[in-house]
Amino acid sequence: MATEYAAEIENLRKSFQQVLLVTDPDGLRERISELTEVSAAPDLWDNPEKAQAVTSKLSHAQSELEKVTTMATRIEDLQALLDMAEEEDTEDHELAQELYEDLAGELAGVTKDLDELHIRTLLSGKYDERAAVVTIRSGAGGVDAADFAHMLQRMYLRWAERRGYATKVMDTSYAEEAGIKSTTFEVDAPYAYGTLSVEAGTHRLVRISPFDNQGRRQTSFAAVEVIPLIEQTDHIDIPETDIRIDVFRSSGPGGQSVNTTDSAVRITHVPTGIVVSMQDEKSQIQNRAAAMRVLQSRLLLLKQEEEAREKKELAGDIKASWGDQMRSYVLQPYQMVKDLRTGFEAGNPESVFDGDIDGFVDAGIRWRATGEKVEKES
């Protein structure tokens, strides 16, 4: 028993060394020192947006360093607990068994948390550390598709809530009978884009339609788009001649008025046809600024995708890496949610729709980094 535990602890040490190579604790300490100095500047809050960005980066760096240093301590504590159990095994076998049970529990917890740290090291893309802007659009399937889009919005907002991430719904277009035609919301947390980017694609729902009086099975679709939120340091020039701006009154479900002035803004980028609408803010100026930020984010992602396509063409590989349908949510005739890229499955759709999607997200990040599918079902 002791030999098996010793081997597991040694494997944890090796995995942790790989995490250390990527996280670079010394580099984190230097970053914390620099950001602490910047945050102490007396004129920092003269620019609230810049100040929030600085304090957010500082908090994130401190949190990352704490996770790494705490993990190092926890692994050494495992070794100390094993040593105690081995010593007691010759004198008090019953106490030794209790210590081994405690060790097994601690090992499981450390393994799980170290696995999460390892997944974070796989988020090394250019914009992975950014906040995310998520857009969900209903597809084929009529009112069921609109309802499905609404279910997905709730799923991601509940996921963010579980993690303590700040969210902000920026725009919602409600369907006439039920659900939503589209919605755009921001998830403001470090690495939100890198984490949620694996959720982008076409989602499929199969169920008995609650909107069909004959109780027939219905298949519906919704598209999820995830883009990084731009920062002031990003440079995407958008000539005024390339955009068309329309203003209109904000509205809620059923057309109920939210604002009696024309404060909502719709910006159309003529060259690409990209359309962004914002109605969450109280003023037209604020909505226009928010819409421009999202437009710039989408153009930034478009530019990145074009660069990636060019690289693939140069390499002679023009196969798409994402299929049209990346995940199925089946409620009838059986209950299962399955990711078609990674093979990850969950047998409790209700829990998934309530925000329990960490398994799908983690599997997606691993699949994107290694191309390997999940061997076991959840």
Image (tube, grey):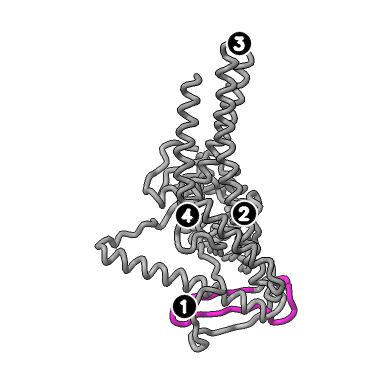
* Viewer-proximal residue among 157 and 232: 232
Where are the magenta residues, as a range? 255-278
If you read the primary sequence from the N terminus, does the residue marked by circle 1 or circle 2 appear first? Answer: 2
How far is the residue under mark 2 from the one under mark 3?
44 Å
Q: Which residue has dot 1 on it?
A: 273
Q: Amino acid at mark 2?
A: Gln
Q: Residue furthest bottom?
A: 241
Q: Residue furthest left?
A: 316
Magenta segment includes 263: yes
Q: Which residue has dot 3 on it?
A: 91
How far is the residue under mark 4 from the one under mark 3?
48 Å
Determine if residue 194 is in view: yes
Q: Mark 2 falls on what kind of element?
A: helix
**In the image, residue 199 lies at what x, y percent?**
49, 55
If you read the primary sequence from the N terminus, does the residue marked by circle 4 or circle 3 appear first? Answer: 3
- Place residue 51 in its image quadrant: bottom right
Q: Which residue has dot 2 on it?
A: 62
If you read the primary sequence from the N terminus, does the residue marked by circle 4 or circle 2 appear first? Answer: 2
How far is the residue under mark 4 from the one under mark 2?
18 Å
Q: Mark 1 falls on what kind of element?
A: loop
How far is the residue under mark 1 from the one under mark 4?
30 Å
